Each structure stands twice: as C-alpha cells, then as structure tokens.
Image (cartoon, grey):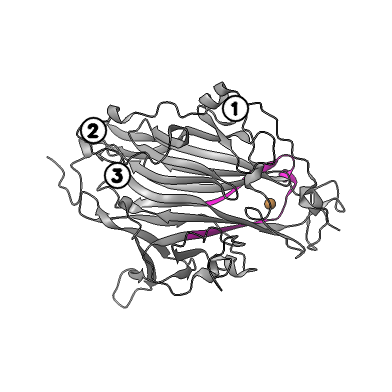
Amino acid sequence: MRVNRYSKVRTRAAVGLTVAALAAGVTAGAGPAAARPKAAPAAPAAECSADYRVEQKLSTGTTWRMCWRYDGKAGLVLENISYQPKGESAPIKVLNSARLGQIHVPYDDGNVEYDDLTGFDFAQGLMNLAPGECPGGTIKTVKVPDSWNEDPNVKGLCTTTRSRGHAYRMQGDTANKVYQAQGKDLLVYTVNQVGWYEYMTEWRFQDDGTITMNVGATGSLSWDDYDAGDGRGWPIGKGASAAKATSHSHNAFWRLDFALDGSTANKIEQYDSTVTAPATGQRAPSTKTTRTKVTKELAGDSKNYRWWRVVSATGKNKDGHPRSYEIVPGPTTKYPGRSYTKHDVYFTEYNKCELFASHNPGDCGAGAGASVDKWVNGQALKHPVVWTNIGFHHIARDEDQQPMPVHWQGFSIAPRDVTAMNPLTPAELGWQNGHWQPRG
Ligand SMILES: [Cu+2]
C-alpha cells in the first residue's frame, strides 16, 4: 500500500516575526505619485496598501505595478497588473488577476493523482525563503489564511530584479556604433511545499512588456513512489534492480483575467497559417494566414502555425493599432487522461466562482461542473478568462536526487502592438517607425 503523501514531516523553520521583520517586508523604493512628472495622468488609485504593492522601475525605464495577495488554495495571486514603458505617460493595465489554476499530478500506474492546489494544501505549504534565495531583492511577509502553524506569517514572497541578456542589438551606421541594451526583469516568486515536492511559482515581468509564468518543481522525488508501479519506473539507485521511481505527470494550469487598458471586454482571436508547396512557375512555397474571431467559449488545441491573442476593446497604441497580448505557450506534453487536461487553452466567460481548472470547490450553479472543460458551454465571450494547460511527463533520472534539479514548465504572454515601437527603442532611433527612409 502506498503511504500517504503527507508522511513527510514538514520542516518549516519557526520564525518569530518581529515588527522589524514585518517592516522589512514592506516594499522599499516604490516611487510616490509626486515623483512622477506632473503632466502625467495619475496612476490608477492604489488598489492595495503599501504592504501589498509591488512597484518596480527597471533600469531600462519600464515600470511594472501590481498588487499581491495570498489565497488559501491558489497561493500567490497577482492583481491589477500594469505596464508602463518609458515612452508612455500612464500605466497600461494588462491583467485584473493572474494566478495558478491547478497543478494536477497523476502517476503513471493509475493508483494516484493529486490536485495539489485544491486537495493537497499547496497554499499551506508556503516556505520561508532564506535571504540568499532572493538575491538583491526583498522578501515580503505573507500571512497564510487559516494557517496550520501557530504563527501564520511566512517570509515567503520574493520580489527582485534580474538581467536577462540582450534585449536587442543593432549595428549602427558607423563602424563603432552599436545599439544594444541588456534586458531587465522583475521577478516575483514563492516556494510551496507539497509532500516531497517543492514548487516554485515564478512570475517574470520583462522590461519589453512580456510576462512569463513558470512553475518549477524541485525538492525530492516522492519517496512513496519508488515501486516501479507503472512497469517502467526508472532505476535511480545502484544497479538494475534498484529503487524505481514511478513516472508521473505535472499538469500545470494558469488562470488569467485580462483587463487590457482597464477594460475586461477583450476580444479573442485565433490565427492559423497553412503552407502550400510552390505552384508551377512559383519560386517558393507560400503561406496563408487566416484570423478567426473567437466569440464563444472555446477549448483550444495547439497546433503547428496556430496562435491566439487577447485584443483590447478600447485601447490603441500611438500608431492607432489595437493593443493586444499574444499567448506564447512553452513546451508541453498534453495529458489526455482527464477531460480538463485534454486541451491546451480554454477561453471561458468570466464567472467569479470558476477559479480552479479541476476540483473547483465553489458552487457555480446547478450542473455547472467542477472543471474548466465543463465551463466551455457556448456562452458568448464578453469578459473572457484565459486558462492555459502546460504538461510535463516526469520520467525520473539518476540526476533527480538529491535535491531534484528544478524542472520548469510555463508560458508567456507577449505584447503585440501595445506600443507603437519597441518599448526600449533608444531616442536616436525613435523616428524609424514604419517604412522609414534612411537619412542621407
Ligand atoms: Cu515530478
């Protein structure tokens, strides 16, 4: 018999939080409104108190603003996320809310599956971060709702910045002139222990407007699953008859409630391209791209040459093009074992009780069902919510012990026409928009 996954004793360090420690968790350096140029429209009224605000102006000129809170099941929830690159006089709102929607972990032997967020206390497992694991940043104190611990406060939320290498490079018109910029990101992350695993929930806000969300699994392989129950458990100890870790999947879901330019009345578009071999007399294959407006709820399947975007109902960039964010999935292994894992992306009409992609605990009305696939039932999309499903099939290897190296899975949303040009364009190149003529 398999022992309960919870047989591992939680070893959370008991941290007696002092007032000073709490104060240290408060955002430092968030610019007061008075520091902004007087002519600029005021930023949206602060939707949260200073303790729950994240505001970071990156050295390349882009400012990200958001509020955070901690949900008793979903863990970290980011709200009212806005982006303000250097050329914009006001923050551009991107999302009302961004959060994990589930981590579903079925084992290959068919004996167990875990709904880690709703059923296995992901949020309760918030871990204290050592100072060294938030390099150059701030560790905020999180009060875990209905905490099992005497002290519900966990120094568990890191906000920091990181360089990501080249944002762009371009040779100038003289030999020694190179336009280049090193990109900077704001990172926001927590670590949550579930059984033997520790999940890193990482949100990366790039200075070019891209948001990347990743779940990283580390900690240890599940000690109770070294039984090759799937008939193919990978030997990870000495010799061929060694302990064999049962393979399993981690199916991670995210739930994104967009509010581009402050409006939730966003539109969804799907693009598909087909490539045709050269016709007689044609020199090369041709590619035709079509747009399909997604006006009703959809369970979408990724496909070669297919992508989706969320389009603002109200906002346009300085070129007059509607602002949008494109969904950029990361590598995924789609798990066909459950109705809710069968599709890569779901667009559902907003419903405040539809919060988890599976095992949704809320009562969403008679016959509503408890998973995201059930909520795709033909409603018109007036306020679409985007759900993404990124799967990882984990066949253990010797290197997975000990500790297990972090394995990441996730996706990005990338700005498409949010600004009229590259938001990091240097001033000297600001005139090179459209079909510009080289200056003699
Ligand atoms: Cu795993």
Instruction: State the quadrant of the N terminus.
Output: bottom right
> Which residue is tagged 2?
174
Residue 386 is covered by the magenta coloring: no
Q: Are marks 2 and 1 in contact (CB under 8 Å)?
A: no
Disc 1 or 3, which lies upstream in sequence? 1
What SS does tag 2 mark? Answer: loop
- Residue at x 35%, y 28% (from the top left corner): 31
What SS does tag 1 mark? Answer: helix
Q: Amino acid at mark 3?
A: Asn
Q: Are marks 3 and 2 in contact (CB under 8 Å)?
A: no
Q: Amino acid at mark 2?
A: Thr
Task: Describe residue 340's horizontal placement relative to residue 381 as left or right.
Answer: right
> Which residue is tagged 3?
422
Q: Position of residue 114 (x, y in %)?
A: 69, 57
| Among the 4 quarters of the image, the one containing residue 141 | top right
Up-down: is 341 above or below 206?
below
Q: Position of residue 108 (x, y in %)?
A: 73, 62
For this orientation, the residue located farthest to the top is 20
Up-down: is 358 above or below 170?
below
Of the two numbered discs 3 and 2 in the rendering, the one whose residue sits closer to the viewer: 3
Up-down: is 122 above or below 166?
below
Instruction: Point out the stretch of residues depicted in magenta.
Output: 387-410
Disc 2 or 1, which lies upstream in sequence? 1
Q: Position of residue 247 (x, y in %)?
A: 73, 57
Task: Describe residue 101's horizontal placement relative to residue 92 as left or right.
Answer: right
State the residue in front, 352 or 165: 352
Q: Amino acid at mark 1?
A: Gly
Q: Position of residue 335 (x, y in %)?
A: 62, 65
